[in-house]
């Protein structure tokens, strides 16, 4: 690793100090060097590994200086939080336990985050649904935390297969929501999520979703900086609300005051609180732009037919774009949506100005991304916005399905 | 809070409210106040919107006097009457979701332990019988089984008071309440027994009839939670509205219930007992 200006060698001094104290052994996490987010994300030399999405999440957590991680098993997430448990055993995560079920886990995260500790958990499908009352209250509680989601079918009937309908339920609660395409995204978005979540003007939870199995259990190439470095710790005193550690002057005013009186002051307080949550959500844009390269990524921006997708549907769309060009001599555009909340409304309006046809491949039945796009582009585009193609219940999406929608007059077998 | 944080910067005294100056100069921070001193110091809880004659409010006031370290305590509550008073205390209070208190407290306590290695931070849950025995039951039991180091205080008024008088698991069998139009059909839940089964280090049952005892039980519970393991206080704090107890008779009712079925009870684990003894020994040594 180079001695970049971004690297702060704070551990050298600490190590000497600890040695003189004589009785504390440095944990693996203590031996990591703290670097700036910019160095971690953009400058640190990276090496490529061929790993699963769950392993990519683990490696992101290892470098994220996490204080508290709380786990509860559910397929296909279990492997990730098991591996985070190993990180705790190795000393990279300071505190870890298995909660009783998701309401308990999400509540405990609300507690540890209020304590000022950098906190994370992960869940999937029915687990997300079970924890939803609590998760939906995190933004109002201004809880900076990271939630990893490995999408799976929402019951019933019972199934464990990939299907990302669950993300529809997260769109309206104020949480910041990223949807990763592959293992590399899962690694990068997770680390960036902590930094964005804890910005003073943001102070909101961030969820990073990927499609279960396709990403979590399949291997892909992930380039990662050295495990000897980690992100700076959370600074809870530089956030939008007081930390609940009783280090503030006493006041008879609760941060989490229930506002249930039937009068206009109460209505006004709650109304302005909601406005502020969504304003904070919007304020995360500049950090998504800075750290993630924007809310969207555009390939072949001039094409008349544009695919818009998020998650695994992006990978399938990329391949369809390649096939369309190489096998059918047609240039198709692709917009990858990285951030679902905040939603890239102005970006999509600009990127779709010229489009004649917009196709939205999705891995769920009801087509939440299509609805979002229709709402965003209404009045700003004359393009036909095609609802689909869609797969659900665990199916994968053959690229021919996308090609068939692109070329309705040709016949594809799938 | 570190006591330094609350001290007013010299020159700014005249801009601070009387309320704040009183809290700093005459509050309980950094001093262990006694019940007998009530009225001579600024209390953690003063004004509140609770009903006239509410036994729960008296109990909460006494609890605040008992806290061994109010300047390093965080309170957690949930839906119910108690939180209407708890939000008015001069101690940080967390109001999360329905029945989430003991899960929030688990995360909070562990997060605080990560951040404050050399300063004990006391976490105290105060919630109603519905919040702890019904909707929060799973979180309560698991926090006990996991031996989470905080205090759970049940404000047991044997009814959902805040929602207008519905039966709870802690209601006595036969009580005629809303949602129990034929009278409650099963027994009051044995939370004391469940606390014992799950290995709670200090368990106490009491009513607010003996104010000094309330403060002393709370102090013990918080100290033991800090050093040994989970602690549980189950307090009869009648709802004079839903049980139609005339306001001047609220304490008579408490005495009556206490004598019939809610007598003072303390169950202390050997480890907790040894810890209490060690405090006593240290205190005596200091005096000598």
Image (cartoon, grey):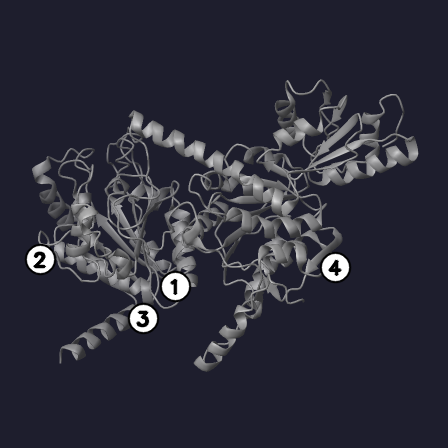
How far across and down, in percent of the image, does residue A322 sit? 85, 37
Visible residue check, residue A216 = no
Query: Do discs 3 and 2 share a chain?
Result: yes
Other-residue count near label 4 (Cα within 10 Å), few / some / many at <14 / 14–19 / ≥20: some
* Residue B217 % position (x, y): 21, 59
Q: How far apart are marks 2 and 1 (CA)?
A: 33 Å
Do the residues indicated by labels 1 and 3 lie within the same chain of the protein?
yes
Q: Could you tell me which quadrant the C terminus of chain A lies in?
A: top right
User: Label 1, on which residue?
Assistant: B116
Instruction: Tell me the mark number nearer the camera, choosing from 3 and 2.
Output: 2
Q: Judge whether residue B140 can be spotted in this image.
A: yes
Q: Which chain carries label 2?
A: B
Marks 2/1 same chain: yes
- Cα–Cα gap, marks 4 and 3: 50 Å
Q: Residues within 10 Å of mark 1 (few under 14, many from 20)?
A: few
Mark on residue A49? 4
Could you give the CA–CA distance between mark 4 and mark 1, rounded to whole angstroms? Answer: 37 Å
Q: Viewer-nearest of labels 2 and 1?
A: 1
**With respect to residue A379, does A243 lie above or below?**
below
Crowding at dot 3, Cα within 10 Å, few <14 / some 14-19 / many 20+, comes out as: some
Does B9 sit left or right of A22 as displayed? left
Residue B168 vs residue A293, the one in the foreground: A293
Question: What kind of element bears circle 1?
Answer: loop
Instruction: Please give left or right for residue A176 compared with residue B192 in the image.
Output: right
User: Which numbered circle lies on residue B36?
Assistant: 2
Q: What is the number of the mark on residue A34?
A: none
To which residue does mark 3 refer?
B271
Q: In which quarter of the image is residue A208?
A: top right
Residue A392 placed where, x, y %?
Answer: 70, 33
Which structural element holds mark 3? helix
Nearer mark to the viewer, of 4 and 3: 4
């Amino acid at each position: 690793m180079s001695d970049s200006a971004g690297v702060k060698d704070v551990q050298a001094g600490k190590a000497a100090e600890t040695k003189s104290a004589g009785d504390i052994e440095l944990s693996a996490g203590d031996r990591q060097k703290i670097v700036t987010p910019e160095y971690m994300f953009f400058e640190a030399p990276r090496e490529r590994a061929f790993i699963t999405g769950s392993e990519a999440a683990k490696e992101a957590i290892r470098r994220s200086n996490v204080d508290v991680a709380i786990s509860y098993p559910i397929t296909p997430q279990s492997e990730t939080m098991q591996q985070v448990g190993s990180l705790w055993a190795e000393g990279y995560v300071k505190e870890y336990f298995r909660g009783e079920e998701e309401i308990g886990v999400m509540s405990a995260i609300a507690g540890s985050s209020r304590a000022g500790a950098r906190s994370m958990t992960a869940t999937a499908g029915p687990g997300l649904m079970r924890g939803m009352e609590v998760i939906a209250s995190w933004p109002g509680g201004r809880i900076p935390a990271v939630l990893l989601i490995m999408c799976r079918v929402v019951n019933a009937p019972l199934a464990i297969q990939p299907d990302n309908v669950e993300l529809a339920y997260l769109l309206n609660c104020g949480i910041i929501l990223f949807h990763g395409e592959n293992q590399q995204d899962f690694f990068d978005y997770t680390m960036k999520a902590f930094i964005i979540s804890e910005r003073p003007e943001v102070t909101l939870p961030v969820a990073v979703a990927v499609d279960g199995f396709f990403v979590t259990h399949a291997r892909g190439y992930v380039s990662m900086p050295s495990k000897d470095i980690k992100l700076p710790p959370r600074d809870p005193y530089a956030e939008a609300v007081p930390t609940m550690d009783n280090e503030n002057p006493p006041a008879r005013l609760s941060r989490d005051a229930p506002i249930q009186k039937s009068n206009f002051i109460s209505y006004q307080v709650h109304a302005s609180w909601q406005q502020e949550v969504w304003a904070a959500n919007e304020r995360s844009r500049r950090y998504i732009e800075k750290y993630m390269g924007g809310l969207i990524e555009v390939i072949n921006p001039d094409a008349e037919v544009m695919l818009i997708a998020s998650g695994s549907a992006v990978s399938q769309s990329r391949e369809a774009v390649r096939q369309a060009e190489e096998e059918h001599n047609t240039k198709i555009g692709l917009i990858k949506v990285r951030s679902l909340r905040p939603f890239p409304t102005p970006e999509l309006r600009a990127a779709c100005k010229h489009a004649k046809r917009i196709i939205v491949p999705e891995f769920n039945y009801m087509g939440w991304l299509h609805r979002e796009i229709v709402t965003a582009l209404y009045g700003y585009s004359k393009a036909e916005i095609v609802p689909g193609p869609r797969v659900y219940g665990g199916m994968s999406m053959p690229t021919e399905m996308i090609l068939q929608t692109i070329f309705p007059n040709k016949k594809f077998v799938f | 809070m570190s006591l330094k944080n609350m001290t007013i910067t010299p020159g700014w005294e005249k801009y601070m409210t009387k309320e704040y100056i009183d809290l700093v100069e005459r509050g309980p921070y950094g001093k262990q106040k006694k019940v007998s001193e009530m009225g001579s110091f600024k209390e953690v809880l003063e004004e509140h919107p609770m009903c006239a004659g509410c036994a729960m409010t008296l109990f909460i006031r006494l609890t605040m006097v008992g806290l061994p370290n109010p300047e390093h305590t965080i309170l957690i509550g949930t839906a119910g009457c108690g939180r209407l008073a708890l939000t008015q205390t001069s101690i940080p209070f967390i109001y999360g979701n329905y029945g989430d208190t003991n899960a929030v407290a688990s995360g909070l306590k562990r997060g605080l332990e990560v951040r404050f290695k050399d300063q004990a931070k006391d976490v105290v849950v105060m919630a109603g019988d519905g919040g702890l025995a019904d909707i929060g039951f799973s979180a309560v039991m698991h926090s006990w089984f996991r031996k989470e180091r905080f205090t759970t205080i049940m404000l047991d008024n044997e009814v959902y008071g805040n929602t207008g008088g519905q039966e709870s698991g802690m209601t006595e069998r036969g009580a005629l309440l809303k949602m129990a139009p034929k009278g409650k059909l099963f027994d009051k839940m044995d939370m004391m027994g469940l606390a014992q089964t799950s290995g709670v280090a200090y368990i106490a049952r009491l009513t607010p009839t003996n104010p000094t005892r309330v403060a002393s039980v709370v102090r013990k519970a918080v100290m033991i939670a800090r050093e040994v393991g989970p602690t549980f206080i189950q307090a009869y704090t009648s709802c004079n509205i839903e049980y139609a107890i005339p306001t001047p008779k609220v304490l008579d009712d408490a005495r009556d219930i206490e004598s019939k079925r809610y007598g003072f009870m303390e169950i202390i684990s050997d480890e907790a007992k040894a810890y209490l003894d060690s405090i006593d020994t240290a205190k005596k040594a200091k005096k000598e």
